[in-house]
Image (cartoon, coloured by chain):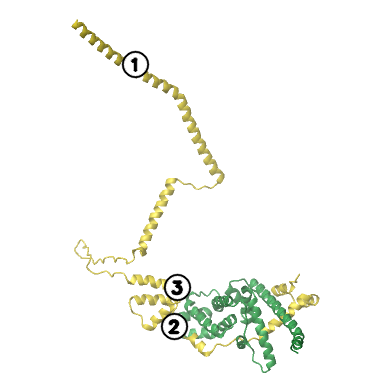
Amino acid sequence: MTCDFLERHFLSGTGPEELALHIAGCASCRRLSADLESLAEWSASLRTPDASENLTTRWLSIPSLTVNCDEAAELMAGEIEREIPSPDKARLAFHLSRCEACQETAQVLGVMANLNRPEPGEFRPVRPHGTVIAFPRRPKAATWWLDPRLYAAAACLLAGFLTFAVSALRITPVTDARSASATVLDSLRVRVNDITDRLQMLEQNAPRQIVATRETLFGYGKAAGNIVLSAAFRTTEGLLEKKGNKL
Amino acid sequence: MDDAALARACRDGGGEAWNTLVARFGKRIYGIAYHFTLRREDAEELSQEIFLKIFENLHRYDGKFPLSAWIVSLSRNLCIDQYRRHKREKSFVHVSDEAVLPLMPSGDDPAKNALNRERTRLLFEALSELPEELSEILILRDLDGLAYEEIGAALELPEGTVKSRLFRARAEMAKIIRARMERRQRGAAWAPVVLAAVAGVAR
């Protein structure tokens, strides 16, 4: 098993006498300590390599090569108006070739630069006292799906729908699982009792309803029978009278 | 000029401020780049890239940590990517004499120079066998001379972890070097026997 005394000494900084005492009695720590000393000596003897003059000149020229993101944003804004001088354009182009975030920004600004500029005189609402208001027509977006108002409107609709849905469902927050399950059981019990009551009522009412239905049917049957019999009697009477007259 | 003022002056486009920054950190950045790549061309490209990143991101430096730690963190991130790419390309790392020459102390004794060259090669070959989390701390502390606080801030590690990893890195490296040297000595002991056998066969 390797001894961890040297590591503990290195981390916590125990005294040199304690270290010497331990090393005298521990072969593995003695060997490791000697190796570490050699290693430290080798590392310390190494030089730091020197950069060439040419390289240092390249480092110093970096501000003329590129810009940071804040400057890039300002230059991009300037480029929309076509005002930036060509050295700045070159620095901006170099930065854009290396910075994805600024590339995205440039693409979006490029879309804005392609928008239709409003023409004066297309729509002029008139104030009541007769002064014409120069109201520029809102330019159409070349790419309507990039319009942030579309997404804002969709978000409002979704929020309204969700609010309505939540209030319609009457979702109440469940604070206690036990009380929630008791509530569910109670509502089930109520429903079962309701169904049982209705069945009982049906059972009680059924015979009366059957009798009533039977009597009604007999009533109709009686009436129909009376009609048929009276019609038959009259017909027979009529026929007999006719025969009597002939004789 | 303190760190925050220097960063602000560079951001505001002060040419003198940038020259000061390059003078203050140039050697350290090049040293870190060289220790990770061991190739002059790669180290030059890497150091140029590091300075470009520093210039383009100075507006993000908020002064919470020392500027040196922020710069070391940027440098280390770029160097580690290069280091990993290099390791992937070469499963076996051989360190050439040309690679260690810029690191050698100057000396008149050719025998001593040869020994130093051999030791330095052994050192970097052993370094390449260490896990990345140990090798980077050893490079930053023992080869580039960074303080524990700077390394901790650059790697976002507590100082205790930095010290613990550094000790493990050194111990591992010492084991690897010792094993290699023992193998070489065993090989050297067998050399006369092998030579005699070859001579006998030739006769």
Q: Which label is found at residue B187?
A: none
Of residues A201 and A156, the one nearer the viewer is: A201
View extreme (right): residue = A25
Q: Position of residue A192 (x, y in %)?
A: 50, 34
Q: Quadrant of the C terminus of chain B?
A: bottom right
Q: Which of marks 1 and 2 is nearer the N terminus?
A: 2
Tell me the residue that label 1 is attached to: A222
Of residues B174 and A151, the one nearer the viewer is: B174
Quarter of the image for residue A226 reads top left
In the rendered image of the structure, the colour used to display chain B is green
Q: Residue visible at 69% across and 84% down?
A: A41
> Are both tags, 1 and 2, on one chain?
yes
Q: Which chain carries label 1?
A: A
Q: Position of residue A116 (x, y in %)?
A: 29, 69
Q: Is mark 3 on a helix, strand or loop?
A: helix
Tell me the residue that label 2 is attached to: A65
Quarter of the image for residue A119 reads bottom left
Q: What residue type is labelled 1?
A: Lys
